[in-house]
Amino acid sequence: DVKVTQSSRYLVKRTGEKVFLECVQDMDHENMFWYRQDPGLGLRLIYFSYDVKMKEKGDIPEGYSVSREKKERFSLILESASTNQTSMYLCASSLLGGSRPAFFGQGTRLTVV
Amino acid sequence: QQQVKQSPQSLIVQKGGISIINCAYENTAFDYFPWYQQFPGKGPALLIAIRPDVSEKKEGRFTISFNKSAKQFSLHIMDSQPGDSATYFCAASRREGNTGKLIFGQGTTLQVKP
């Protein structure tokens, strides 16, 4: 079974803090994604990566950056956390190419106070 | 053109009834249409998926119906059970370069009453 593991289930951070969300997958997938889930808005893509050190912006990249130094690990960075970044963050991975299912982690519920 | 529109936002069905969730898309380049199921506190999990060369796909009580000309697809849950209560997301993707990013609908919260 594909396993995508996010480092934290719940996080509470203060406004202005730098926040790191970590994700690891064990199936040698080329693609990794960070989504944000908010009620009524579905899942919105923040950033994705299709190879080590490669990244592309998704639909809502403002206020976020990412890092992929190893194939199995994809980090989401909130440079200066703000209250409007309070959300559920979901990491996913998939094989390279279109028409592939994505496998999700359990999510990180981030609260910025 | 990148959007996938999902309806209804919420749905209440009696046990044993049929749950129907609809999605519509604009981009005719989409060639993969999965449905994901998410239980509270969990990440979404792939439920069933279809490609545009078939009009229907069935797996157990779950069926996807696909209408290519109308650019619509729907999930039918037959004999709905309380254990099906979850949030359901439709999605679409296309062969965009070497990536496989999924575009998601807004989600439908299904409650199946016993």
Image (cartoon, coloured by chain):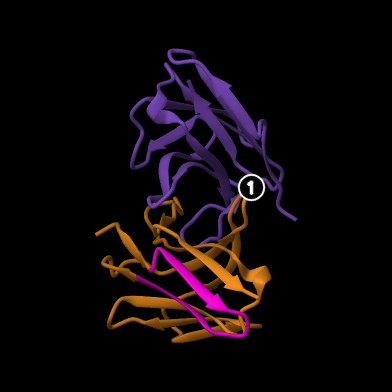
> How many callouts does the rendering have?
1
Q: Quadrant of the N terminus of chain B?
A: bottom left
Q: Residues within 10 Å of mark 1 (few under 14, many from 20)?
A: few
Task: Give the percent coordinates (x, y) of residue A11.
Answer: 60, 26
Q: Which residues are magenta?
A: B8-23
Q: Is B13 displayed left or right of B9 in the figure?
A: right
Q: Is residue A47 left or right of residue A91?
A: left
Give how far across and how far down residue B50 sits, in percent.
Answer: 50, 75
Instruction: Mark yes or no: residue A73 visible.
Output: yes
Camera-side residue of A81 and B104: A81
Residue B17 colored magenta? yes
Camera-side residue of B29 and A51: B29
Task: Identify the image quadrant of the C terminus of chain B.
Answer: bottom right
Residue A7 is drawn in which quadrant?
top right
What chain is colored purple?
A
Residue at image coords 52%, 28%: A111
Q: Is residue A63 above or below residue A9?
A: above
| In the depicted structure, whether residue A88 falls above or below residue B48 | above
Q: Residue lying furthest right in this view?
A: A1
Say what amino acid the circle numbered 1 marks.
Answer: Gly
Q: Residue B24, relative to residue A9: is it above or below? A: below
Q: Kindly identify the residue that appears in the image at 41 percent across and 81 percent down.
A: B66
Mark 1 = which residue?
B41
Q: Secondary structure at mark 1?
A: loop
Q: Magenta stretch: residue A4 in it?
A: no
Can residue A76 be seen here?
no
Question: At 66% across and 71% down in the image, what residue appears?
Answer: B82
Query: Disc 1: which chain?
Result: B
Q: Which chain is orange?
A: B
> Measured from the top left, where is residue B77 in percent x and y?
56, 80
Q: Residue A110, image x and y in percent?
A: 54, 30
